[in-house]
Image (cartoon, rainbow, N blue to C red):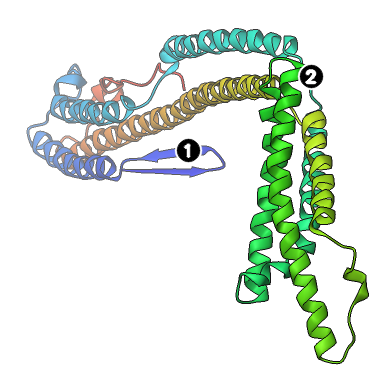
Amino acid sequence: MKTHSKNRVYSYQDPALDKRILNTSTHTKHEAKLDGMFTAVRLIPAATGDKYSSLVGSIVGVYNELLAYANKVIQGSLNGYQGANDRNRVEERKKKLDTRINAIWEEVGLKRMDLVRLVLTYPWKKRKYIVVGIVAISGVEAVMAAQSFQLFVTNLILSILVAILVWGALIAVAHILPKIIRKGETVAQQLLIGIGCLAILSTVFYILGEFRVEYLTRLSEFAEASGAGSDNSIFGISSVSFMVLNLFFLSISTLLSYFYLPNSKQRQEKEAWDNLNDEINDLTGKIEKLNAEKQTIDDEFSFSQEKRAAIIAYAKYSEVWIKTLYENSIQAFQKENILKRSDKQIPDCFDQDPPELNYYYNNINL
């Protein structure tokens, strides 16, 4: 059993059924010739007055059985495809999908209204530029102090790695410090928290400044010992100088974070905004899937209709073919009967139309 498709034009053929029809008709035609010869010897049918139907009953029976068998085979194939009568069921399925789609659209509409009411008080598009500024400012002193870390590590590469860690720590401090200060419920409390943090950071930066002064001192001594002369520029530079410089850069980063990065309320607004957008996207995604499912239902129904039409066309063709083979068998009976008759008469019943076969697809529209 084969199905061919090209540019959405389908044809159907059942080679096994075709072979059955051909073999049956060949055998029946041969039997019809024998019947014509044997009846001619007895001058049957009579030259006048006999009924044709009583002579070819066996031929009619064979071809009616063949039509019934072909119908059974073809019906088995048709049952796998939807016909025009299934349109209501298809429309019902699509109607249920439309109901679901409309319900989801209503939900999308409500969430979009919530999105309109949710005002973002922070300009999130500018956030990345603020973050870049904080990262750059925090990195200035860390990069400048990288070589001084060689006092407690073995080589320049390790000192650079330490500088990167310090850089990351400064960025984290600039980001976290405003949150810590905001924990104060009053301005006075926030001021006290800020002073406390400043004291801690001043101590840390003072220690880092000691490292830098020590490094520069050793560098100057090495230059003097090697004959390059001493570097008088380091005189007057103290740990406090480096501490103040570090505090200056950190203060800028912290102020940028405090005034220009979103606070907790603004982050909550953005989180709610993102969640609503994600929910809307999920719902619209469901709508797209349901619309695709509707389209699939239509496509499958159209495909099924085309396949069914191809099978019915084959059924009609098969019945026309069987009718032709049936008429050929009748003609073979008549011809053999006329040739073998001793009276050389042509029975008048041969002018009658042969009995009609039982067709199944004459009145079925494609």
Q: Tag 1's secondary structure?
A: strand
Q: Is residue 263 left or right of residue 63?
A: right
Image depth: mark 2 or mark 1 in front: 2
Question: Of 212 and 103, which appears nearest the observer?
Answer: 212
Residue with the most extreme bottom position: 227
The tag on residue 188 is: none
Vertical side of 67 occupied by 155: above or below: below
| Residue 107 placement (x, y as % from top left) | 59, 9
Distance, label 2 to label 1, CA atoms, is: 62 Å
Q: Amino acid at mark 2?
A: Thr
The tag on residue 121 is: 2
Vertical side of 122 occupied by 171: above or below: below
Vertical side of 230 occupied by 92: above or below: above
Question: Of 321 and 1, which appears nearest the observer?
Answer: 1
Q: Is residue 179 left or right of residue 348?
A: right
Q: Residue at x 17, y 18 (%)?
A: 50
| Residue 313 placement (x, y as % from top left) | 42, 30
Residue of label 1 = 10
**Looking at the rendering, which quadrant does residue 160 occupy?**
bottom right
Q: Residue at x 51, y 11 (%)?
A: 100
